[in-house]
Amino acid sequence: MDAVRTRLRQSVSLHRSVVPPEEEEEEEELGGGAQRVEVRFVTSHEEEEPSSDITALVMRGHRGYRRVGVFVSVCGVIVFTTAFLLAYAVFGGRCQSMQERGWGDEDGQPGGGAKPPAEGGAGLYLGELRVMMRRLLQDEDIHNTVSRVSRASHPPGSAEGTSLASEILRRFRRLQMDHTWTESLYATLQFPNRSQRSSLWLVDSSGLILEQIPLNPADFCPYSATGSTTGGIVYANYGRPEDFNWLKSTGVSVIGCVVVMRVGGGVSFAEKVWLAERNGAGGALIYPDPADVPQDPRRLGLNTYTAVSEHVHLGSGDPFTPGFPSFNHTQFPPIQSSGLPLIPALPISATVAAKLLSQLAGPSCPRSWRVRLPYVRCVVGPQFSSGRQVKMAVHNAMTPVLLNNIFSSLEGRDEPDQYIILGAQRDSLGPGAVKSGIGTAILLELARTFAAMVKNGFSPRRSLLFVSWDAGDFGNVGATEWLEGYLSMLHLKAVAYFSLDQAIMGDDVLSAYSSPLLVDLLDAAIRQVEHPKHAGQTIYSQAERDGGSWRIMKPLYLNSGAYSFTAFAGVPAMELRFTEERAYPFINTPLDTASRLQEVLGGRLGVTGRSLGELVGEMVLRLAHDHILPLRITSYAQTVLQFSAQLNKHSAELQSRGLSPQWVFSARGDYSRAAETLQRAIDYSDLHDPTTARSYNTRIMRVEYYFLSQYVSVVETPFRHVIHGRGNHTLSAFTEHLALLTFDPGRFDEGRFRRQLALFTWTLQGAANALNGDMWSIHNTHT
């Protein structure tokens, strides 16, 4: 038995020496692999000694059983050795695989490309990927990139813009991702006329010029109508529908007048000008009021001589190729977007606005309209107290400009034809630290991080696409033209889009302008990421303290970089933004510089940018890792349910007019049941079966696309989404028309309402039918 004990100790000693010292150190650093082996080893060793003692006692008491004891001992040694070698093969092999992945290679420099090792990355868990991403994300380069991008104005087609595009292309190529390329197109953009400046004058009743009001020649509204107009001044607050309705209710007409409106109020410049035009105005002037935009330079405010510029095309993309792409400078029949304004528009400073509004006479404003301009009594006009009028002239010129969108991608392992897209605007009419700098910086940092993760063993199921867009300041022209060029395939291939535009305007409050399909994805992500301003708190916990995380979610808006992806192309999209309670005052001005942004953030630009990058990266990881896409396919059922409740309130009156809302109720029920049935089928299926997962993912990806109305023209009505779009076919237009039954029954148009009812109902019913999947599962029995 002593010989057996000696062999046993030699065997244990031999197995201890199998693991090399360097692998033991790496296993300890990675957190637990070697410890698990050691626990099994000690346990086996401790269990073996008592077994040997009992054998010895039995042998001493019963010499006749020596052979049995030897046989038992030898069997024990064989079992122990086999178990130990098996454990070592499993854990040692895993640690060796981790060592081969090269965790230290973070910089993405040349020397291997982005492809993972064979079989690499498939076994990494989401938690491991999350830790890897956090280790690789850096904040040092974010401030440097913002400073580089915003060192000077860089509009599309300029020398500075071209230089920046070349630099971003080089940075993508240095990452050695699977594919990097550019796509060029010509688009028609509008710039100030170099030979003739836009002007503003005070004139007498006969049109004789009394005074010219100085304007900055660089301030303009892209896509304004050109020409001149003369008339009285009407102050219309923010230029919202309710503001023009109030003016109408008090008998103040804006017909033929120049309307002065404030920046903000949740209304874009394009919407303000469109509403002014629709109410009969002859021109529009838009200014930043100190009540909305801080204008105290001592406290990081805008100075009163600075105007805010923004495009006024009520749409996106090249307005002279609405609904179809501008690739290759193709010649199309003459056509222009219905969203182009027919009246001239100019941005003016608070100083110019004060000069005009201080001379107005007429009815007093409501209390909520009051301005914070010096020496201004809040009256709405339209007369000047001195009998004067204002004359404005806009001289802009349309110019074809070559645009360049820059792409870089990492191919997916299992479903490479499904794309998760991240994009940011690159151009800016001013320095654009917020407008284009921060988005570009986060885009490049996320691209570098995911490229490094692939080198370290991450193998995404789906492809990642990183894009730098051109001509964003003119209405997301570069992105929209790309969408128009690939519209027929995107609903089959694009999983989701994340816009990084204007992502950092503060470091306190997070807002997510998003498709409802992404709400669960965001909710899970904010529980994982630390708040940039409140150490030790997640974004979720801080939001709960501030009134509830539900406040983070907001609807997509027209000027968002994400809007066209959802409203035009039917792709779930999101735009994230950190802000402060005090508005960032420099956006869309020549003062939007890296130094001012850094001062607003208290020197925390890099930290805040990294936090937002981690938040986006968390959602991208889920979409790239999970077998089934984590989108909430039942979300639109709740939206339609809320509308159904409003419709039900007017049910009796509608029926008295021969209109029945029953079809809408039936379609909503069909959609809810179809979405819930699909969700249950997913919950109870084998999601690791590739065919099953692919089938479900295809249906999930098309949910957003199903809400694009098939009954309106993409050329005449590009934003066809019935929930997020614009036009007579949308739920919002339907709701506004329905409200007339209560507030103005005389304006209710029964024929128009019937058409709206039909368009919305059959779009919703089509979505329900498509979710059902099989023809034999669909039973439409409308009577």
Image (tube, rainbow, N blue to C red):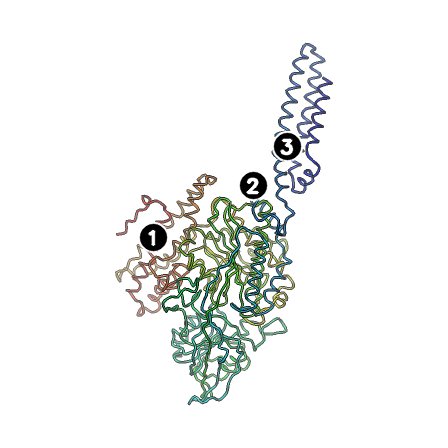
Give the camera-side residue of 700 and 152: 152
Q: Amino acid at mark 2?
A: Ala
Q: Which residue is mark 3?
A: 88
Q: Secondary structure at mark 2?
A: loop
Question: In the image, residue 60 lies at what x, y percent?
Answer: 72, 13
Give the camera-side residue of 596 and 259: 596
Q: Residues within 10 Å of mark 1 (few under 14, many from 20)?
A: many
Query: In the image, which disc is placed on residue 118?
Result: 2
Q: State the CA–CA distance, disc 2 to disc 1.
A: 46 Å
Q: Amino acid at mark 3?
A: Tyr
Left or right of 212? Residue 781 is left
- Residue drawn at x 64%, y 29% as measured from the top left: 84
Left or right of 296? Residue 657 is left
Question: In the image, residue 456 lies at what x, y percent?
Answer: 60, 46
Q: Secondary structure at mark 1?
A: helix
Q: Secondary structure at mark 3?
A: helix
Q: Which badge, 3 or 2, is on the more N-terminal residue? A: 3
2 or 1: mark nearer the eye: 2
Q: Evaluate whether residue 526 shows in this view.
A: no
3 or 1: mark nearer the eye: 3
Figure quadrant of the N terminus = top right
Question: In the image, residue 80 lies at what x, y percent?
Answer: 64, 25
Query: In the image, which disc is placed on residue 335?
Result: none
Number of marks drawn:
3
3 or 2: mark nearer the eye: 2
Query: In the image, which disc is placed on residue 765?
Result: 1
Q: Evaluate whether residue 483 shows in this view.
A: yes
- Residue drawn at x 31%, y 57% as measured from the top left: 661
